Image (cartoon, helix red, strand yellow):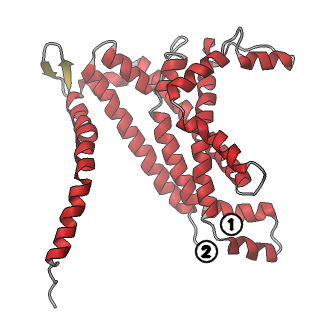
Amino acid sequence: MGRVAPSRMHRRHYVHAYLFIAPVIVLFGLFRVWPSLQTLYYSFFKVELLKGRLTFLGLQNFAGLVHDEIFRAATLHTLIYAAAIVPIAAALGMILAVLFNEEFPLKELFKAIYFAPMVTSTVAAAVVWWWLYNPQYGLFNVILKLMHLPGQPWLLSSRMALPSVIIFSIWKTLGYNLVIYLAGLQAIPHEYHEAATLDGAGSLQRFLRITLPLLAPTTTFVFIYNSIFAFQVFDQVYVLTGGGPARATNVVVLELYNQAFQRYQFGYASAEAMVLFLFILGVTMLQYVYSRRFEVAY
């Protein structure tokens, strides 16, 4: 039999469905797709917006990035930041999720406390942490002095500034990872653990042989999300250090911002944005493909 054409009622349902999602598609196209295409276009030009003039440069902007020491240093700082925050935040989130998966008093209160940083404005939280990091009267140095340990320069030291930003970012994303892992744990059937317990498996064996493999899809999502977040880091660096001291915390998005809105090199900044996009795309695809090897089904 030939393919039966959908009825008029079905076609009407399709029309209604597309009408409902049309505003989202239009807004996504205007504020996501079109700016991305425009950025790609500008990356091949010298852009002088005040003069309304575009000068075609071909691949010169991209070639300039190869020899740009500041951009290379910013890329290195971004890689260090991502390499630290992604596994640490994921591991801590998983550990807390395992603890919160058990019943104990005031569980929901503690869960809300851990998740609160995620829904707090990054700028507001960074301002508070800037005061906490203050080397003279900040809370962190006060605690160190009470423990008879020397105070630290934190954000004023080129050696400690980037680790200080990393600590803040781990604190900021920890609650989100906790909730995602907790959802993944609660989706694992209890029968698997009960059967393993009857077979004599201990808590550690059950975690390594059952929980960890079945959390592989959740871990993949957490790693990809945290990686995208890490490579696009801007606001906490801008507020806490401004890229200093001595460009020790200068990251790619901050350098992109400086090129576009401080030096008005919009074409060069667009090239930096495209390189960052390709890098994030490559890392995301690599993580997704590699993580598929660890997914299991019982």
Q: Is residue 84 visible?
A: no
Q: Does residue 238 appear to the left or right of 276 in the view shown?
A: right
Q: Position of residue 133 (x, y in %)?
A: 66, 17
Q: Position of residue 166 (x, y in %)?
A: 60, 29
The amino acid beneath tag 1 is Ile
Q: Position of residue 97 (x, y in %)?
A: 67, 51
Q: Residue at x 27, y 37 (%)?
A: 31
Closer to us: 50 or 79: 50
Closer to us: 113 or 131: 113
Query: Which residue is labeled 2 in the image?
Result: 298
Q: Quadrant of residue 1?
A: bottom left
Residue 155 sits above or below residue 76 on the image:
above
Residue 41 sits above or below residue 210 on the image:
above
| Circles 1 and 2: CB atoms closer than 8 Å | yes
Query: Extreme bottom residue here?
Result: 1
Q: Quadrant of residue 120?
A: top right
Q: Residue at x 31, y 21 (%)?
A: 64
Q: Position of residue 259 (x, y in %)?
A: 34, 17
For label 2, the crowd category at 10 Å Cα-Cα, with few meaning under 14, some 14 to 19 and many 20 or more, is few
Give the secondary structure at mark 1: helix
Give the secondary structure at mark 2: loop
